[in-house]
Image: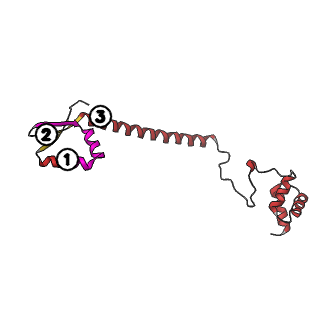
């Protein structure tokens, strides 16, 4: 880029007259950035916002300019709908899990030997034992079968 093009670019970027741009360019020894800093110190160019810096290349802004209220409302409604759908899904999961635990507490796991009740406890306890200590629970159940133990699930019959 020759001298004339650089001065013209400085003039456009700084929004100053050609003479001011040429003078700053000559004072800076042909460096556009230094020329822009000189013009800024002279008060002819406003400093960048937020104590930022200048770039020598042009940037484009990709933000939506002049977004109307309709688009904003659509985006807000979509976000609310998504939030509502998530809340509904979490409510359904919560109801399912609480119903499952309630059913597990109402149903018992009985251990029998020769038709005599040896132990009874809720299925929820069995599920927790199988979940957290399967290396103990499963072998005990299998060994119990070899020693003549029988297992059954007994639930309360209720009208739901």
Image coords of residue 125 (percent x, y):
26, 39
Image coords of residue 118 (percent x, y):
15, 37
Q: Quadrant of residue 24?
A: bottom right
Which residue is found at the position 34% from the left and 39% from the top?
A: 97
Q: Secondary structure at mark 2?
A: strand
Question: Which mark is drawn over residue 52?
Answer: none
Q: Any magenta on residue 80?
A: no
Q: Which residue range is magenta in the image?
A: 116-139
Which residue is found at the position 14% from the left and 47% from the top?
A: 145
Please name which of the two marks, 3 or 2, marks the residue nearer to the observer: 2
Q: Quadrant of residue 31?
A: bottom right
Image coords of residue 52 (percent x, y):
74, 52
| Location of mark 3 (residue) | 102
Specify the principal SS of the magenta part.
Answer: helix
Q: Which is nearer the eye, 79 or 67? A: 79
Please name which of the two marks, 1 or 3, marks the residue nearer to the observer: 1
Q: How many other residues sit within 10 Å of disc 2, few (<14), some (14-19) or many (≥20)?
A: some
Q: Is residue 134 left or right of residue 78?
A: left
Which residue is found at the position 16% from the left and 42% from the top?
A: 151
Q: How many other residues sit within 10 Å of disc 3, few (<14), some (14-19) or many (≥20)?
A: few
Image quarter in which the C terminus is found: top left
Q: Are marks 1 and 3 in contact (CB under 8 Å)?
A: no
Q: Earlier in the sequence, mark 1 or mark 3?
A: 3
Q: Secondary structure at mark 1?
A: helix
**Residue sitting farthest toward the top:** 159
| Location of mark 1 (residue) | 140
Image coords of residue 49 (percent x, y):
75, 48
| Location of mark 2 (residue) | 112
């Amino acid at each position: 880029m020759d001298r004339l093009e650089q001065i013209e670019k400085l003039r456009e970027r700084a929004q100053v007259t050609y003479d001011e741009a040429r003078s700053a360019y000559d004072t800076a020894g042909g460096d556009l950035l230094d020329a822009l800093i000189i013009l800024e110190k002279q008060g002819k160019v406003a400093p960048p916002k937020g104590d930022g810096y200048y770039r020598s290349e042009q940037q484009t802004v990709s933000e939506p300019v002049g977004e109307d209220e309709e688009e904003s409302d659509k985006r807000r409604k979509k976000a609310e709908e998504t939030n509502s759908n998530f809340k509904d899904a979490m409510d359904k999961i919560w109801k399912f899990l609480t119903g499952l635990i309630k059913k597990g507490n109402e149903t018992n796991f009985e251990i029998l030997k020769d038709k005599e009740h040896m132990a009874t406890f809720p299925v929820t306890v069995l599920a927790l034992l199988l979940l957290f200590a399967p290396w103990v629970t499963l072998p005990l159940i299998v060994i119990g079968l070899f020693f003549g133990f029988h297992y059954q699930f007994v639930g309360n019959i209720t009208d739901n």
